[in-house]
Amino acid sequence: MTAVTDATTDLDAKVALYRRQLELRLFEQRAYDLFLENLVKGTSHLSLGQEAIAAGFAAAMRPTDWTFATYRGHAHTLARGVPMTPVLAELLGRANGLMAGKGGSMHLTSVEHGVMGSYAIIGAHLPIACGAAWSAQYRGTDQVAVCFFGDGTTNIGAFHEALNFAAIWTLPIVFVCENNLWMEYTRTTDVTAVAHPAADRASAYGLESVIVDGNDADAVYDVAAAAIEKARAGGGPSMIEAETYRHGGHSRADPGKYRPDEEVAAWMAKDPIVRYRARLIEAGAPQSRLEAIEREVADAVDLATEQAKAGATPGEDLLMKDVWADGGSSWRN
Ligand SMILES: Cc1ncc(C[n+]2csc(CCOP(=O)(O)OP(=O)(O)O)c2C)c(N)n1
């Protein structure tokens, strides 16, 4: 998909943003179906319900910008333009997977698409994203690092170290907290001293803090574009807290039963994709155009499923490959 340039005013760009959100949604629904068929290897964490954040940010980024994601990284990886087949094949542990079947759901990376990794250790990637941003600053490129993480991450030391570091070095980085209200099984406000876990702490590090409706792709796009351009122009880091909700539990093994029914229902009524579709119709997008997109995306997911399932099981020769950046594994002192 071509880059969306002015997603909040141009109808074609908005339609592209709808398509992208739908791709993320249908892809992950299929991933869940394949899990139920016992085809997905290892665990996986879906971001169903959070699609507007990945899609809105990716639309505001240049191809040379960098994404740093968590283990909940399928949507961020796809939103940067990584094709569906290698991502799905990776979940299935196949040789045609993005990491040749060795990484699984939690380790998606595609440097050529600016996807600089998915990190399973909470908070670990914030300092790493600072390092990338520092390298852009040092080399005088105009790249920006965008680092996504959850609300629970804000209680980890690395979060605070990274914010301070980014601020004192005026790094070109945008921190994005996807506040879906819940950590693994704990409500974030039960264990956090402030109401807005990321935004309320940003000022302690001199960072601009923004709270946005994370279920509104246009609103996300607007704040993303502003923060990214500020970083690119040398204005330093921003903290964006995007309020959202995941439709399911923490990981594939968690039905999320501890969440109150009314809370789940209230957020389901704010489904970002249903809302966005209604907005497009109101803005004059023909129903038939949206239906065509819906068919195309469903077909693309079917094709990716077929191709992923057809992938070979990785051979033993892969075990000792890709340990180092040069592709090998021999020990070096
Ligand atoms: C340092 C560390 N501690 C604990 C865990 C186990 N763990 C995995 S996900 C998670 C909850 C994270 O919640 P949040 O940051 O809100 O993100 P969400 O999963 O809701 O997207 C925890 C505690 C871990 N991966 N790393």
Image: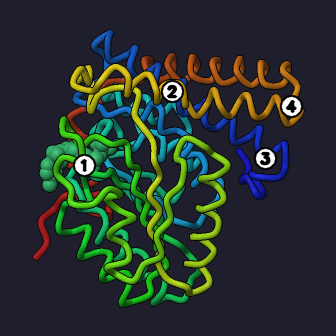
Mark 2 touches mark 3? (CB < 8 Å)? no
Q: Which three-letter amino acid code belongs to the residue tagged 2?
A: Phe
Where residue 36 is drawn, which disc sits there?
A: none
Quadrant, the N terminus: top right
Q: Which three-letter amino acid code belongs to the residue tagged 1?
A: Thr
Near mark 2 (Cα within 10 A), the count class, few <14, some 14-19 or many ≥20, is many
The residue wearing badge 4 is 285
Q: Residue at x 52, y 38 (%)?
A: 51
Quarter of the view holding residue 159: bottom left
Q: Residue at x 38, y 53 (%)?
A: 69
Q: Image height check: is 37 above or below 95?
A: above
Q: Image height check: is 15 above or below 144?
A: above
The residue wearing badge 2 is 27
Q: Which three-letter amino acid code belongs to the residue tagged 4?
A: Ala
Q: Nearer the viewer, mark 3 or mark 1?
A: 1
Q: Earlier in the sequence, mark 3 or mark 1?
A: 3
Quarter of the view holding residue 79: top right
